[in-house]
Image: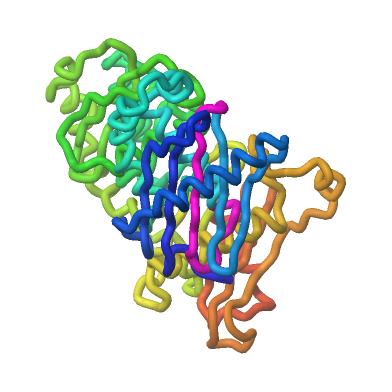
Amino acid sequence: MGEEGTEGTVHLLCLAASSGVPLFCRSSRGGAPARQQLPFSVIGSLNGVHMFGQNLEVQLSSARTEDTTVVWKSFHDSITLIVLSSEEGTSELRLERLLQMVFGAMVLLVGLEELTNISNVERLKKELRACYRLIDSFLGDSELIGDLTQCVDCVVPPEGSLFQESLSGFAEAAGTAFASLLVSGRVVTATESWWRLGTPEAVLLPWLVGSLPPQAARDYPVYLPHGSPTVPHRLLTLTLLPGLELCLLCGPRPPLSQLDPQLLDRWWQPSLDSLRACLPLGPRALPAGFPLHPDILGLLLLHLELKRCLFTVEPSGDKDPSPEQRRCLLRSFYTLVTAMHFPPEPGQQEEKVEDTAQRAQVPRACYLVSGTEEPGTGWRLVALQLGPRRLLLLLSAQSPCHGLRSLATRTLQALTPLF
């Protein structure tokens, strides 16, 4: 199994579907932004072959060469997105979801009307520049995984009920039902209305805040790709501590100036020490001292109905492989088990009609050994699905293969009360 993002280049192309005019091109190499651009002749050929197929009523969705995977996707017969990846082990599933996230980001910051009724291409190009930072974060080596799982990246705070009470009170005082507390782009807690946000905005809004440069307060216009793609809302953010931000989604009111320091102090000053304890939760996701088996090097827990996930590669951080490699291994394993073994998540369209008859034969667990099966070599990856929860673990080479399912079952039982 390859390690996504370790090597190779990713090129993302956005074109106007009717004219084939390029709107932007973003590239990354090894997870870092790259200036290398594709020649116009290549862009024209990639779009031309896609349009040729459409004219013959053939939908070209993906292709592979010896070292590159290409995925095409059209949105609303107006925007065509193309992604090329030469990263080792990249999957079509990952690239398809990348394109869905990219278009969602475009709607979030520009609005669907501008994308479906293109009257001035040059003006649209300028407006789309506002999306570059967010889109580049999808192409980079992010510590988040919501772009792939399409579930909201969350953390588990040590005093969740205290934060929930403070957040609900603050949101009511501010006059909005949509509020969340974020640490490094992950949700610590949120109001019930925030949790009811649809996909992809539930994933995109925290990701957007995490991708922006630090700022004490923001008043940011956003569209909701699922809930309000043509009428903008306001995303208000307030920094409580560096890396820890309050987010409010609202209409014309309240003005940002109304959220004065006295209102913040009233609801959050009593929780200041607990808020400080949340800061390390960004990469760790789990509270300090949470019991995990010492062989666990990383985990991904998904609640497929709530569309939330916990993702961390912090356990046993002093061991090999590096955090970057751990993230790559878990992301690759997730795409493998999702595409090959487990059924698609609720709301996804990847399931084919001919696959539905095989639902009764879907496995509940699977594992993969990197290297040989001898103890002390390679790494072990195990996935377990029980009800709405799916758990993926990256384990050290010392973990015996015959004990993987038992270890995963015990870990899932310990994590189940969290959400």
Q: Nearer the viewer, residue 109 or 37?
A: 37
Q: Horizontal placement of 185 versus 146: left or right?
A: left
Relative to 200, residue 89 above or below: below
The residue depicted at 66 percent of the width and 36 percent of the height is 54
Asked whether residue 159 appears in the rendered view, the answer is no
The residue depicted at 62 percent of the width and 88 percent of the height is 374
Q: Nearer the viewer, residue 124 or 374?
A: 124
Asked whether residue 79 appears in the rendered view, the answer is yes
State the residue lying farthest toward the right.
357
State the residue lying farthest toward the top.
252
Q: Horizontal placement of 189 versus 212: left or right?
A: right
Q: Quadrant of the N terminus?
A: bottom right
Q: How many marks?
A: 0
Colour mode?
A: rainbow
Q: Nearer the viewer, residue 338 or 174?
A: 338
Taking the magenta stretch, the answer to whether it contains residue 77 is yes
Q: Horizontal placement of 381 versus 289: left or right?
A: right
Residue 316 on image: x %, y %: 40, 72
Q: Nearer the viewer, residue 148 or 280?
A: 148
Residue stretch rendered in magenta on the structure: 76-94
Residue 326 on image: x %, y %: 45, 68
Residue 107 on image: x %, y %: 42, 28
The residue depicted at 37 percent of the width and 62 percent of the height is 29
Please tell me in which quadrant of the rendered image residue 404 appears. Answer: bottom right
Residue 108 on image: x %, y %: 39, 29
Taking the magenta stretch, the answer to whether it contains residue 370 is no
